[in-house]
Amino acid sequence: MSGFNMEETSEQTHGREMEYTARGQGRKDKSCDALANMKARLAKVELAIADTRERVDLIEQGMEKGLEDLTEQIQDLHEGVLGSQVQPVSHEEFMSFQDKVMGMFASVKSKMEALAARIEARDQEIRREPTIYKTAVSARVMATHEAPRVEVPKPHMFSGKRDAKELDNFLWHMEHYFEAIALTDETTKVRTRDPLPH
């Protein structure tokens, strides 16, 4: 096959996407996939927060409307009792009725305040979740960019003999040394190598 530059390619599957890598070239960085996944999750959480906030606003509006309606009903009932001439009501009965109504009003008010407190706590919890995800994403990105620091013995110096086996062994040790320290850039490899003796 002289004259043709043939590259061997391999097909690899990662989840739902296909990835083609040429032999001798670097593979796709998995940290980009993880970062994209975390960003997608973060977007979903932000949408959920917005949706929850809208629901909280609707609940608060409904509670305010219900409180206004209850106040109006109490006022109408109070005016109806005071304006009613059909059946006279004693002062004690009126005070008893008023106490019952005020007790129900206080009960509804305390339940609404408890509900509002729970909603606010949930809202705060939901607001903290994106921060947690952002921290996790940045920690994962930082972890993927740092090469692990492994103590790797340096290969022996080349003896300078014109022996093919000796040269092959030296090159094999150098390649494994560079793999162990996660050095993939060819120009850095050239600058990193010890100078050969003359």
Image: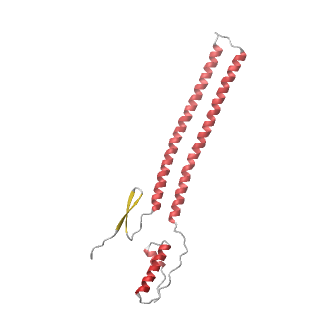
Residue that appears at 53% across and 41% down = 53
Colouring mode (rainbow / by chain / secondary structure / one colour): secondary structure
Residue that appears at 60% across and 25% down = 70
Indicate the position of residue 14 as horizontal and vertical percent values: 42, 59
| Left or right position of 21 against 131 | left
Q: Is residue 70 above or below residue 159?
A: above
Q: Is residue 3 above or below residue 54?
A: below
Quadrant in which residue 121 is drawn: top right
Location of the C terminus (image quadrant) = bottom left
Indicate the position of residue 183 as horizontal and vertical percent values: 47, 72
| Left or right position of 25 against 83 | left
Residue that appears at 39% across and 69% down = 25
Furthest-right residue in view? Answer: 92
| Left or right position of 147 against 15 | right
Indicate the position of residue 111 as horizontal and vertical percent values: 63, 33
Q: Is residue 69 above or below residue 59?
A: above
Quadrant in which residue 84 is drawn: top right
Furthest-top residue in view? Answer: 86
- Nearest the viewer among 184 and 9 is 9
Residue that appears at 63% across and 17% down = 79
Q: Is residue 89 above or below residue 197?
A: above
The number of callouts visible is 0
Location of the N terminus (image quadrant) = bottom left
